[in-house]
Amino acid sequence: MSKKDYSPAQRTLIEAIRRIETLPVGPSEPALTFRLQSWAAASAASFDLEASAMAAETVDRGAGPASPGSASIEPCRTADIRTADGRTADIRTADSLIEIARQVCGGEADPRRIAEQTLERIAALNPALNAVVATTPARALSEAGTIAESLQAGERPPPLAGVPILHKDIICTRDTPTTAGSELLRGYVPAADAAVVARLASSGTILVGKTNTHEFATGTTGTVSCFGPALNPWDTQRVTGGSSSGSAAALAAGLVPAATGTDTGGSIRIPSACCGTVGLKPTYGRVSRTGVIPFAWSLDHVGPMARGVADVAALLTAMSGHDPTDSASASEPTSDFGARLSDGIAGLRFSLPRPHFLQLAREEVAAAVEEAAAVLERLGARRVEVELPEEMAEVGPAAVAIFLAEGGSVHARTLESRPEAYQRETLAFLSLAGEVSGRAYVQAQRVRARLISGILRVLQSTDLLLTPTLPITAPRLDEKTVEGPAGPVDVRAALTLFTRPFNLMGLPALSLPCGFDDGGMPIGLQIVGRPFDEAAVLRAGYAFESATEWHERRPVI
């Protein structure tokens, strides 16, 4: 594609790259991506996209081994789940994964029947939502059977025993297709689980399938996938948000109580806000990326998604911890993130920044977040005023440069050899990688270093930042622009406006529902904390959730 053929959206991105090239950033060194200590100890676990695409193509042609047949979209015959006293226990009413695990561990529910009924519910409701792209009945029933046998043998069950879970289809799962929403990987079947999948499985979760994703996690709407778009259960004419689109839609519809997502510019928090669910982007390095198909290495995060804060905390406890095979894995100690959720927030300081956030949000979104701040104050938290770093103004250009430089590198060989395998929007975005000069990339990382330094100074004066997750609610599927304070804004850029700063900073950020707009669409509240202080973020989220009823609303499916 010649430069004269670039679309207006592409030209906007190129202008951002040119801006970062000439930005005066003083003598700042660029932000470091890797820690030397963990890198030296790592056993190089990088994802080879070209080799995986070649393997997928071989399987697709029928020249190689086929999938073991454990992944499919099929109805599953099931019996009712019965409690100890013989009553029918409908998994649809068990909103909390903590409650499901309690029932299984206490012998009140059979994990095999929970798995069966979950698969049945997916088969019944997923055709209307396109949230799940593969189910894993054989693996689900095998894992459930193992848990049931251990319970019968009197063994101590794992903490999340019997909890059905869906993994985003960019996270590798053993003997189960992992496509990243792309024709390029259709037919790719990993030989091993990603680290996060293995950790959750060892904690007792039952894998029931994979969720739809914006192709290679490169977009914010959830509308670009070789499987077609995932649809928002609150209004199927509106986007789910992306890129963890299927995970949020499946949770909102009650298909499962637990899911995973990835977040490079907001891809856990955006769909959580659009679909009225809860999602956490942990601190960079808190959760291993090993076995996760990368988008931009220095911005990629893996995190938990659920329907409540306590459930997210339980998932994070199982997911987190140092992994020597991940070059960015942190060695900071982990803990039980649910242990102090009920301690309250008396004395906790928070700030609600207006520039860069509240002033750019739609009126009903801003009003809902202001009310959320008032709720926290009534619960004993103390509101303080802080001034954000001036580098906040350069977040957009810096993020674009890093997205394209790193994403372009990941896809360089396959973009050249198999461009037809990419969706048109993904190809148009990644084709701009050549516009990012070495100077632009280093400048972006220097801006990032200054931004991190500045925000850490700010967080000496406050414990948390409160913002809207999005400046808008879920836009229509056909909506290309939304009205901003200075005129029309590309809807894809609008959706990342409040989330991408915290990918650059690597800070923990939680999204949870705090209201609904006049059209009945959820509004998301974002709570951001200090590095590796997910406990405070979750405690504040849990306090707000416990004092309100927004999280209890459910769409009619």
Image (spheres, rainbow, N blue to C red):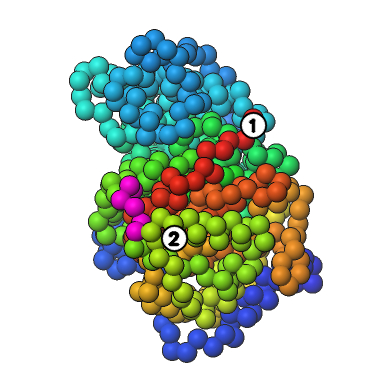
| Disc 2 element | helix
Marks 1/2: CA–CA distance: 33 Å
Question: Which quadrant is home to the C terminus?
Answer: top right
Q: Badges 1 and 2: C-beta atoms under 8 Å apart?
A: no
Question: Considering depth in this image, is 260 or 440 the residue closer to the camera?
Answer: 260
Residue located at (36% from left, 63% from top): 348
Q: Earlier in the sequence, mark 1 or mark 2?
A: 2
Is residue 458 visible in the rendered image? The answer is yes
| Disc 1 element | loop
Q: What residue is shown with label 1?
A: 556
User: Disc 2 residue type?
Assistant: Glu
Question: Which quadrant is home to the N terminus?
Answer: bottom right
Count of numbered labels shown in the rendering: 2
Residue 151 appears left or right of 88: left
Residue located at (70% from left, 51% from top): 475
Residue 461 appears left or right of 523: left
Residue 344 on the magenta segment: yes
Residue located at (59% from left, 67% from top): 358
Q: Crowdedness of circle 1 by 10 Å Cα count: few (<14), some, many (20+)?
A: few
Q: What residue is shown with label 2?
A: 377
Question: Considering depth in this image, is 143 or 538 the residue closer to the camera?
Answer: 538
Relative vertical location of residue 100 with respect to residue 551 in this rendering, above or below: above
Q: Position of residue 552 (x, y in %)?
A: 52, 38
Q: Position of residue 503 (x, y in %)?
A: 48, 63
User: Disc 1 residue type?
Assistant: Val
Give the magenta part as a residue range. 341-346
Q: Quadrant of residue 105?
A: top left
